[in-house]
Amino acid sequence: MHAKRIVPNLPVADIEAAKAFYTDFLGLSVEEFNLGWVARYTSPATGANLQLVSGDATARIDSVISVMTDDVDAAYAEAQKLGYEIVHPLTTEEWGIRRFFVRDPDGNVLNIAAHRD
């Protein structure tokens, strides 16, 4: 698998309540998107970013990072071949992403994803 981008997913109780801390204090003032349950904030000066997550919309578990890849289908096949635990199946979500969740050997859940072109 080829990881193009990795973004941390920070669990929060309420995105709107947490937003000011990350936008004002940390300077992540660009809101790339906000779906109500997940939002990405980025620094315009450095490109540093993170996602705030209050609970995944379709998965029964939240992920700690999102890994963007060119070929999520190949990544899914590779994860299965290597015997890794898939905790959310390969799914094309209504908001325009194809993804699956996999558990690493230490129990961390990763969101492996590709955006529609």
Image (cartoon, rainbow, N blue to C red):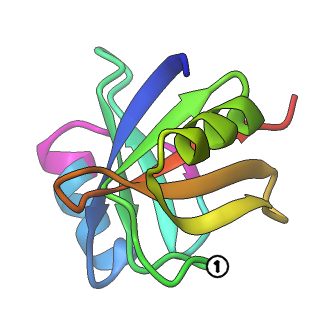
* Position of residue 71 measured from the top left corner of the image (x, y, whole percent): 73, 26
Three-letter code, disc 1:
Thr
Q: Is residue 30 visible?
A: no
Indicate yes or no whether the magenta region holds residue 26: yes
- Left or right of 115, for residue 113: left
Q: Residue at x 25, y 69 (%)?
A: 18
Secondary element type, mark 1: loop
Please give the residue where the numbered disc 1 appears in the rendered image: 58
- Left or right of 3, for residue 48: left
- Left or right of 43, for residue 39: right
Q: Judge the density around disc 1: few (<14), some (14-19), many (≥20) Cα neighbours within 10 Å.
A: few
- Give the quadrant of the C terminus: top right
Q: Which span of residues is magenta-colored?
A: 23-33
- Give the quadrant of the N terminus: top right
Position above or below: 14 against 22:
below
- Tell me the quarter of the picture where residue 52 sits: bottom left
